[in-house]
């Protein structure tokens, strides 16, 4: 048996080794078998050896799933081995078969059986709303296998807690996805999304509290799952209440509590509280505090509701109900407005307490209805139904709606009369007028005694020894300041010379010294009886008022005038009787006077249109045409450039340059006084096309060449560069060559940057360096405005107010109105056009053209003209053919049409490609119509219409010397085209097709100017218009009416009128005259100016500073007038101030620039205010920046200074030996001194000092820093002593202790250790020094490479109080600490980032260090700490930058730090300090600036409590992002400088002005980004003002022909040499004229002419007028202009003062007539006797009176007699001596030619005047005169004395509403479809902003209002609505006119435009 076993064993071994030796192959005959779970699957394996089946081979089987029938079997003779496998678990079995060492594998997949059930598992059956519930659905078979191949269908029903279904959702889940299902409580919907998964998983997030039912289905198998969702904690609260109801009334209020998903929550405790309304103008003044609730606590029910009841307070207004959810922060405040109850009382009140009868004072009458609780009744709706009617006892009615405060206000008064008025107010509501009324009486009273009219009539009597009149009537009238007579005024009279006569007063027994009282009319009458010859003054005294009247008792003959007015008190509109007696007292024969006159003429710049051209200008427009300008930008640039060209004046030359990859000149320099030249410039602009790169430098080079080599010698040279990108092509990409060339040749460069992808720093640099300005245009649509701004800067006048070619002209003698007429016949008519692609003929059959018809048919007026071509031509698709035809026989007078057709399309319906363009019709060689556009033809035709109208022609004669002539053609319709031509006497034709010099066309106007200035304004202006007949021709295509107006320059008009004036003078008759001209410019250096300013006037002083400086203009004046002072740079106001005796303006001004200061006075009495302008300067704070420049070796720091608007060019400090890496600047607090300290890459520390003018020698204090990568030094000044301290490291001296030196103002101390008793642990890397702002104390903080942070204190003489703050800062390579002083307390704070993850700080109290305190925790290493202190408080800002690229900021309020606020999470790199903080000096506003991964630094501002949102500074213009950021505040303003470095090694500076950033200035392009190698410092200077002269442009006058010494012919020649220049100094001309006439005998005349307002000069116009009057000089004044508002209103006052006349001349013809008329008056010798000129008021206004006196025609009765017999004239009227009445300005003159009178003769007249007005009216004005010449030839004028005045009363007070102030019309829809309607809301307010009442008239061009009405009238009270609709598409232009219901002359207009679009769809194919 043992043997058998051994044989068997060896046999097996043999077989195994045999098999092993074979090359077996195991092959599965069944692979990847599919089967069902629990069913057997057979597996067959073939064993072979090199293809031969192997028998009896042992095959082993294994599987990872299921059960095999045998673990191993032997192969049969066929090599086959078989087993079976079965699995009740679904899945894939991996079956392995092996024979020997060979194996193979196959898979058997067992699929699940049919689904028997669905297993559902939810991780929570109850969940809180908003939390996720995960639900797994498993479809399983009978064996428990999950069937992953079939999805599970779900039907999910979500119901809220009220059982209301939210959604019923059909969906499915499968094994490959997870479905995320969201049920939203806010949107009431369900959404889901799917994502990859490994299971049947539904992730369900339901924010709806309630029940969820999930039905899951697979085939017929179902499952139902229930989930409960409960509400979360209270998160929301809703209050249901009535927002508004009557006071003292109850209403329900309910609070509902929800979770954060709006699910109501049950059993929540709520508390209520109430706050009654505050006291406001809208409610009762009484305090009730009666508001209450029915319950103050409650618990929510199942719906989350707590019901309650609230009762409003008795006081109207907002009742605040506060509702709190207990134990939560949830609180809700609701405001319930209590409205007033029904009216219970009606109040009527007025202010002020009393009003004066001054025609200014008004009563404001206020009516206010209130309820029983005194709440005002407020208007409840619009239109406002609650109104008040005010009715006077005189019947005047005003209806006023209640305003928002429940009041209706009306105005009573003003009145010039003493009177009373009763007013009744009645309340009206929606039901009509109520029974609530109230009444009051208002009184207007006289004022206190202000003046007295005191006169003697006559003023001269004869002595008792001569026969004649010995008595004079004495009259005194007591007056208030408005001319009301005052009764019961006590007056003391005193005759100062009782020898010459005796004074008596009616009713009083005393003589000469008499106390008397005014009667009921305010008068006292007396008598003076003359005795012996002599003079006396009668003195009248009452209180502070003293008056004198002089009486002369004469012993020689004289002419006497006596006046009497009766009655002396009347009502306005009454008739008064006036008696005038003239007597010759003694032997006095008289004759007519001779003429003496001075012409005072205006020669200011506004007199000549050429003056406005100013200095000649050469300008080149340089335009970027690179590819980025494509589309809208290049078109906007073209349009803006053309507009700019239109804004230039005639003596400008323009050149055009454009650039892309290269540059080119598009237009050479071209003069713009010619229309064709301007067209050629615009065509060149239009020809600019885009494409390529940006070679701006080459463009500027071409522009420089044009300006310098092709420009004009005396012209200003300006270049304007526009670009939208960075220079990237061509030469001179940095612009330095262009800058140098421009500066060397006086070229100013303005730059415009379009868009944001700009190198703004370069553009600003170019402009700054050449004296120009940089402008930024965010969008191309902004270009037009920018070019307009530049044109204003280049103009010598305000282009917004003055139109070139209009100002300086005045209408001339010729005006024509006519229209073109149709001609009787026409010939010589030519058609021209160009054809495109007209090259084919075709067979038209029997139609026109036959078999060889051209493709284009031309018809004229429907008649065939020609077919083109006549035969086939070579294909000319790209060519234009020119065609010309005589169409005279085809056209007709009037309208005609030429039509073009695609003839092939007409005949066949097909089409050819063809077009026509440049259509033109010529008649007699003149173009009458043209169309330039290319139009492609079709079969419907292209019509070109034209009219043939007879040209209009007329002739004007120029036979006098004129400098400028303008002929203007005007018409109304812009669609019509009329053409103007002007033919000179010599045959030159000016106009569109001829000589276009001075030709200016527009849409409905064009004019020809002979000739506009082409170069420099001449000194003599000798260029005159050709004399002779000028022919005016108008042609065109319309019969529309037109107007032709001729104009000449005002200077020529003045010369012509002056010659006409002089034509009446005759030297042989003793006439004499002189000429004074104003204004002439003189430049005077002075630190002051003294002049005068009138009411409603402005004095203008132009000046030029001699040095740069901060200039202060102190303006003072003597009276209490309100004066405004403004300092201007051009039209830009730099500073403005208003005061009543003093004010001051100031600004930083530049030497050589011209500025002006305006001194203005508002409305008021016409008095001259004398003022003085004192000029002083203070030293300018030096603002300096120093920085590293790698150019030239880099060892020399560069420096620039700020001049107030720009940075200077770069200068150099002294060489420091190596490249600076850190730069520190500090300024002395006591001297104009700056210290610069630098560390460099040779480990040196160097110092040099700026003394205000230059840098001192360099001192090297260290050559052995520990590292140059950290700043191992710092520098500060002691703030009291002015000494400076520098601390620094020197490893050669001590590696752990800093050294220091002290600068005493003249030298540095020797080197010393900061402390010697305590070595540092490591090498000091960072040094930080900070000075106490209030003492000489300093804090020094150092950090070493061992992470130690130490501090010590300098007390002004030594170091102490050393402390180790920490030995574990977070990092030693970066400055993770800072130190700052509180600016008020003087405490210092050191803050640092500690390694333990906390920001910490310690406080130096002034005597000791406080303990360490944690500020906050940080999340990543803080690398940088930066602090800044508020200069006005103890607040401090602290910013940090960390390793995670985050920036945080926090603030210290003096006691604690706020939580840090993250402002940025992505700075570009944390290894540079890309953040800084600062405070504005005055406001206390903080600011933080930081950089990020863009070229635009960001910032936020801090108002003391919150940070603003993030904003952007200007881009720093580089591809490298911001690296270092530094802020430097201005110590004198809220400005802050921001200096940055970037990745391109550029340094940029921009300035914060307190609200926004200025454009960036790039100060350096080759610095370094690795270190803070720059600094900025302010140097405070002495601010004591020092008187400083400036060069004033003083405008004075000149006597060009003297009155005494020059002949009349000399004067005529002087008139011919007048030129124009400068400002208007009327006072200077009058001053000189008075001087000239001071030696004239007898009476004299001055004629003043001006075209503007007196705005210059140094004398008082009023004082000069009084001076003239006192010298018996009469002044005639003439205003000359297009409108009387353009001339000075003082002219009338001047004339009135002297008894002259004021005239206004709107054109040259009237001006000449006025001058001739004045000359005739003063040179008329035709009369035989004296001339009586009585002047009476006509629209006369003074402080005492407003009056108009009208002579009653036919009322005269004249008598004559002598001493023996004379009947004093009286009624009745006979009409026997009617005067000649003339009216001018404020006076009328009644002139009588008296008969010759001899000794003792008397002449008298009685007549009547109607008096209208108020106050104390001088019916006969004191400027009235009698004129005669005595036997010696002396000119004598006798002034008519007093006695011609009356007190005029009346009644004028009434009620009136406030004027309309604002009408708004707003539509709901600006765009609407036809037949739809929109609502127009009309809102009316008065001038106080209250609701107003008006009739409104509405009109629209299309559509209708309301019920199909257009126009429509509606009544609007406060606000109302009107419906508008239209059945027509188009634009609806709607206009609303509001007429004040109480004053129909009070009108407002509002307009709106609506777009009405058609309905439906428009298809375009």
Image (cartoon, grey):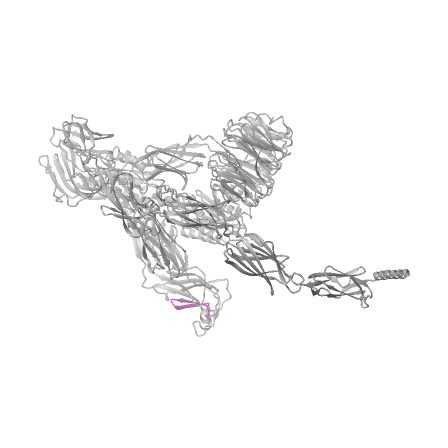
Q: Nearer the viewer, residue 706 or 105?
A: 105
Q: Residue furthest right?
A: 3
- Residue 1711 is situated, as x and y percent measured from the top left of the image, at 28, 45
Classify residue 1357 as left or right of residue 1657: right
Residue 858 falls within the magenta-colored stretch: yes
Which portion, as a residue range, is magenta? 853-871
Q: Is residue 1735 visible?
A: no
- Residue 1302 is situated, as x and y percent measured from the top left of the image, at 56, 27
Residue 615 occupies quadrant: top left
What's the magenta bit mostly, secondary-structure-wise? strand
Classify residue 1343 as left or right of residue 1024: right
Numbered disc total: 0
Classify residue 1829 as left or right of residue 722: left
Classify residue 1496 as left or right of residue 399: right
Q: Is residue 74 above or below residue 1246?
A: below
Q: Nearer the viewer, residue 1588 or 1498?
A: 1498
Q: Nearer the viewer, residue 614 or 1586?
A: 1586
Q: Quadrant of the N terminus?
A: bottom right
Residue 1578 falls within the magenta-colored stretch: no
- Residue 643 is situated, as x and y percent measured from the top left of the image, at 43, 50
- Residue 543 is situated, as x and y percent measured from the top left of the image, at 24, 30
Q: Is residue 1955 visible?
A: yes
Q: Residue furthest left?
A: 1764
Q: Is residue 455 above or below residue 878?
A: above
């Amino acid at each position: 048996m043992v043997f058998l076993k051994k044989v068997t064993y060896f046999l097996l071994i043999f077989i195994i080794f045999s098999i092993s030796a074979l090359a077996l192959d195991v092959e599965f005959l069944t692979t990847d078998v599919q089967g069902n779970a629990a069913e057997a699957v057979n597996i067959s394996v073939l064993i072979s050896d090199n293809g031969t089946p192997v028998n009896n081979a042992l095959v082993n089987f294994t599987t990872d799933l299921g059960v095999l029938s045998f673990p191993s079997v032997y192969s049969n003779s066929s090599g086959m081995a078989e087993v079976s496998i079965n699995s009740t678990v679904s899945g894939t079995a991996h079956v392995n078969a092996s024979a020997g060492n060979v194996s193979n594998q196959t898979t058997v997949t067992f699929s699940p059986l049919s689904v028997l059930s669905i297993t559902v598992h939810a991780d929570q059956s109850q969940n809180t709303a908003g939390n996720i519930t995960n639900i797994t659905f498993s479809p399983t078979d009978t064996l428990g296998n999950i069937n992953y191949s079939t999805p599970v269908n779900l039907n999910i029903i979500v119901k809220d807690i009220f059982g209301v279904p939210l959604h019923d959702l059909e969906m499915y889940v499968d094994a490959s996805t997870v479905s995320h299902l969201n049920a939203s409580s806010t949107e009431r919907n369900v959404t889901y999304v799917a994502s990859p998964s490994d299971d049947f998983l539904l992730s369900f997030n339901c924010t709806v509290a309630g029940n969820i039912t999930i039905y899951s289905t697979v085939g017929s198998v179902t499952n139902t799952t229930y989930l409960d969702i409960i509400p979360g904690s209270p998160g929301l609260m809703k209050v249901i209440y009535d927002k508004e109801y009557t006071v003292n009334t109850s209403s329900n209020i309910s609070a509902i509590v929800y979770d954060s998903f709006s699910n109501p929550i049950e059993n929540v405790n709520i508390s209520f509280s109430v706050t009654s309304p505050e006291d406001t103008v809208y409610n009762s003044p009484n305090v009730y505090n009666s508001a209450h609730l029915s319950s103050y606590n409650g618990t929510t029910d199942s719906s989350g509701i707590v019901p309650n009841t609230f009762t409003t307070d008795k006081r109207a207004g907002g009742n605040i109900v506060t509702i709190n959810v207990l134990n939560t922060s949830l609180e809700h405040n609701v405001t319930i407005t209590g409205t007033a109850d029904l009216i219970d009382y009606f109040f009527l009140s007025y202010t002020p307490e009393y009003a004066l009868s001054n025609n200014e004072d008004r009563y404001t009458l206020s009516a206010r209805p209130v309820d029983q609780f005194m709440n005002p009744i407020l208007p409840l709706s619009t239109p406002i139904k609650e109104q008040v009617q005010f009715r006077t006892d005189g019947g005047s009615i005003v209806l006023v709606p209640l305003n928002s405060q429940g009041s209706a206000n009306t105005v009573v008064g003003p009145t010039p009369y003493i009177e009373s008025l009763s007013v009744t107010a009645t309340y009206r509501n929606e039901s009509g007028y109520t029974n609530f009324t109230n009444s009051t009486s208002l009184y207007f009273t006289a004022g206190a005694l202000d003046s007295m009219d005191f006169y003697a009539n006559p003023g001269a009597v004869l002595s008792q020894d001569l026969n004649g009149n010995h008595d004079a009537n004495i009259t005194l009238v007591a007056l208030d300041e408005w001319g009301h007579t005052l009764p019961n005024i006590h007056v003391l009279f005193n005759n100062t010379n009782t020898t010459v006569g005796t004074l008596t007063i009616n009713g009083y027994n005393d003589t000469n010294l008499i106390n008397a009282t005014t009667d009921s009319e305010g008068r006292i009458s007396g008598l003076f009886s003359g005795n012996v010859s002599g003079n006396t003054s009668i003195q009248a005294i009452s209180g502070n008022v003293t008056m004198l009247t002089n009486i002369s008792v004469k012993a020689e003959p004289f002419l006497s005038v006596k006046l009497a007015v009766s009655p002396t008190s009347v009502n306005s509109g009454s008739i008064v009787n006036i008696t005038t007696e003239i007597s010759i007292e003694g032997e006095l024969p008289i004759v007519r006077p001779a003429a003496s006159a001075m012409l005072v003429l205006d020669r200011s710049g506004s007199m000549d249109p050429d003056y406005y051209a100013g200095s000649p200008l050469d300008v080149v427009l340089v335009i970027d045409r690179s590819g980025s300008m494509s589309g809208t930008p290049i078109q906007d640039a073209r349009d803006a450039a053309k507009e700019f060209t239109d804004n230039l004046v005639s003596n400008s030359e323009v050149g055009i340059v454009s650039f892309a990859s290269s540059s080119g000149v598009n237009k050479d320099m071209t003069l713009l006084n010619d229309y064709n030249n301007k067209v050629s410039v615009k065509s060149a602009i239009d020809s600019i096309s885009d494409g390529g790169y940006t070679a701006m430098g080459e463009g500027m080079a071409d522009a420089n060449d044009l300006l310098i080599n092709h420009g004009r010698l005396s012209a200003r040279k300006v270049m304007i560069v526009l670009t939208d990108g960075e220079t990237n092509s061509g030469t001179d990409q940095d612009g330095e060559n262009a800058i140098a060339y421009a500066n060397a040749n006086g070229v100013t460069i303005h730059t415009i940057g379009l868009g944001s992808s700009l190198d703004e720093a370069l553009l600003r640099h170019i402009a700054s360096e050449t004296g120009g300005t940089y402008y930024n245009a965010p969008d191309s649509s902004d270009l037009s405005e920018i070019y307009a701004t530049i044109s204003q800067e280049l103009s010598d006048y305000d282009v917004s107010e003055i139109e070139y070619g209009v100002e300086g002209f005045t209408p001339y003698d010729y005006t024509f109105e006519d229209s073109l007429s149709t001609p009787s016949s026409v010939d010589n008519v030519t058609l021209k056009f160009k054809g495109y692609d007209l090259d084919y003929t075709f067979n038209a059959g029997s139609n026109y053209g036959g078999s060889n018809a051209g493709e284009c048919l031309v018809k004229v007026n429907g008649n065939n003209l020609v077919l083109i071509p006549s035969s086939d031509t070579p294909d000319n698709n790209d060519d234009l053919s020119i065609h010309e035809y005589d169409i005279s026989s085809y056209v007709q007078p009037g309208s005609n049409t030429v039509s073009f057709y695609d003839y092939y399309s007409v005949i066949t319906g097909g089409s050819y490609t063809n077009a026509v363009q440049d259509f033109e019709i010529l008649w007699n060689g003149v173009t009458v119509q043209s169309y330039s556009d290319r139009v492609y033809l079709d079969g419907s035709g292209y019509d070109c219409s034209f009219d043939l109208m007879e040209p209009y022609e007329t002739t004007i004669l120029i036979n006098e010397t004129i400098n400028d002539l303008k002929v203007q053609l005007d018409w109304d319709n812009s669609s019509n085209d009329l053409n103007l031509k002007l033919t000179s006497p010599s045959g030159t034709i000016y106009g569109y097709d001829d000589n276009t010099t001075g030709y200016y066309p527009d849409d409905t106007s064009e004019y020809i100017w002979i000739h506009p200035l082409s170069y420099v304004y001449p000194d003599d202006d000798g260029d005159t218009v050709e004399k002779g007949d000028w022919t005016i021709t108008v042609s065109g295509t319309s019969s529309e009416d037109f107007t032709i107006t001729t104009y000449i320059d005002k200077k020529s008009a003045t010369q012509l009128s002056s010659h006409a004036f002089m034509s009446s003078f005759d030297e042989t008759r003793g006439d004499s005259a002189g000429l004074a001209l104003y204004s002439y410019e003189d430049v005077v250096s002075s630190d002051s100016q003294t002049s005068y300013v009138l009411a409603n006037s402005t004095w203008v002083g132009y000046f030029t500073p001699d040095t740069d400086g901060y200039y202060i203009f102190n303006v003072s004046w003597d009276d209490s007038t309100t004066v405004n002072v403004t300092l201007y740079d051009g039209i830009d106001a730099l500073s403005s101030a208003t005061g009543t005796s003093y004010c001051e303006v100031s600004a930083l001004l530049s030497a050589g620039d011209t500025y002006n200061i305006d001194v203005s006075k508002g409305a008021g009495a016409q008095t001259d205010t004398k003022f003085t302008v004192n000029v002083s300067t203070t030293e300018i704070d030096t603002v300096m920046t120093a920085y590293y420049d790698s150019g030239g070796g880099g060892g020399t720091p560069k420096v620039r200074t700020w001049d107030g608007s720009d940075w200077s060019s770069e200068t150099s400090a002294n060489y420091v030996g190596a490249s600076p890496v850190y730069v520190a600047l500090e300024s002395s607090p006591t001297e104009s001194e700056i210290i610069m300290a630098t560390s460099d890459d040779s480990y040196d520390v160097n110092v040099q000092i700026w003394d205000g003018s230059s840098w001192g020698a360099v001192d090297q204090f260290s050559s052995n820093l520990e590292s140059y990568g950290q700043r191992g030094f710092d520098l500060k000044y002691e703030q009291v002593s002015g000494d400076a301290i520098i601390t620094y490291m020197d490893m050669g001296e001590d590696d752990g202790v800093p050294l220091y030196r002290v600068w005493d103002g003249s030298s540095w101390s020797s080197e010393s250790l900061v402390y010697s008793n305590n070595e540092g642990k490591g090498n000091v890397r960072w040094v930080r020094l900070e000075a106490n702002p209030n003492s000489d104390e300093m804090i020094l903080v150092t950090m070493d490479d061992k992470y130690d942070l130490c501090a010590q204190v300098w007390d002004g003489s030594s170091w102490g109080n050393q402390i180790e703050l920490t030995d574990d800062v977070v990092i030693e390579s970066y400055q993770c600490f800072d130190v700052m002083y509180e600016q008020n307390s003087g405490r210092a704070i050191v803050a640092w980032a500690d390694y333990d993850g906390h920001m910490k700080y310690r406080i130096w109290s002034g005597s000791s260090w406080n303990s360490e305190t944690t500020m906050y925790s940080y999340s990543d290493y803080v690398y940088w700490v930066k602090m800044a202190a508020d200069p006005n408080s103890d607040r401090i800002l602290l910013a940090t930058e960390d390793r995670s690229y985050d920036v945080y900021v926090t603030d210290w309020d003096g006691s604690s730090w706020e939580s840090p606020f993250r402002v940025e999470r992505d700075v570009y790199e944390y290894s540079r300090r890309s953040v800084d903080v600062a405070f504005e000096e005055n406001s206390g506003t903080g600011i933080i600036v930081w950089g990020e991964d863009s070229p635009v630094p960001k910032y936020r501002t801090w108002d003391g409590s919150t940070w603003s949102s993030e904003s952007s500074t200007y881009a720093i213009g580089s591809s490298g992002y911001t690296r270092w950021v530094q802020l430097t505040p201005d110590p004198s303003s809220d400005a802050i400088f921001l200096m940055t470095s970037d990745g391109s090694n550029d340094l940029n500076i921009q300035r914060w002005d307190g609200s926004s950033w200025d454009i960036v200035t790039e100060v350096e392009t080759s610095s370094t980004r690795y270190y803070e190698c720059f600094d900025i410092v302010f140097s405070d200077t002495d601010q004591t003002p020092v008187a400083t002269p400036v060069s004033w442009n003083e405008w004075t006058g000149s006597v060009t022909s003297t009155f005494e010494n020059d002949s009349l012919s000399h004067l005529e020649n002087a008139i011919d040499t007048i030129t124009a220049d400068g400002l208007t100094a009327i006072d200077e001309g009058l001053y000189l004229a008075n001087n000239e006439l001071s030696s004239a005998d007898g009476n004299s005349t001055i004629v003043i002419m001006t075209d503007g307002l007196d705005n210059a000069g140094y004398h008082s116009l009023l004082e000069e007028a009084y001076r003239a009057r006192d010298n018996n000089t009469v002044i005639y004044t003439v205003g000359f202009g297009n409108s009387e508002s353009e001339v000075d209103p003082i002219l009338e006052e001047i004339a009135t003062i002297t008894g002259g006349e004021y005239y206004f001349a709107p054109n040259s013809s009237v001006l000449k007539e006025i001058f001739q008329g004045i000359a005739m008056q003063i040179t008329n010798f035709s009369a035989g006797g004296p001339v009586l000129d009585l002047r009476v008021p006509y629209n006369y206004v003074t402080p005492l009176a407003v009056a108009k006196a009208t002579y009653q025609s036919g009322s005269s009765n004249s008598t004559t007699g002598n001493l023996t017999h004379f009947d004093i004239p009286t009624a009745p009227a006979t009409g026997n001596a009617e005067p000649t009445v003339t009216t001018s300005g404020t006076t009328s003159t009644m002139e009588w030619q008296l008969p010759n009178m001899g000794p003792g003769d008397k002449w008298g007249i009685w007549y009547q005047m109607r008096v209208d007005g108020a106050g104390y009216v001088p019916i006969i004005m004191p400027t009235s005169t009698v004129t005669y010449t005595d036997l010696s030839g002396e000119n004598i004028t006798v002034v008519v004395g007093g006695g011609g005045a009356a007190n005029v009363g009346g009644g004028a007070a009434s009620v009136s509403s406030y004027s309309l102030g604002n009408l708004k019309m707003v539509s709901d829809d600006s765009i609407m479809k036809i037949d739809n309607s929109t609502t127009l809301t009309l809102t009316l307010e008065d001038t106080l902003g209250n609701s107003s009442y008006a009739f409104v008239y509405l009109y629209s061009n299309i559509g209708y209002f309301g019920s199909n009405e257009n126009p429509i009238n509606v009544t609007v009270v406060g606000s109302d609505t009107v419906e508008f609709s239209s059945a027509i598409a188009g634009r609806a232009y709607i206009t609303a006119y509001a007429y004040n219901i109480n004053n129909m002359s009070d009108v407002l207009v509002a307009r709106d435009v609506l777009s009405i679009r058609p309905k439906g769809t428009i298809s375009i194919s």
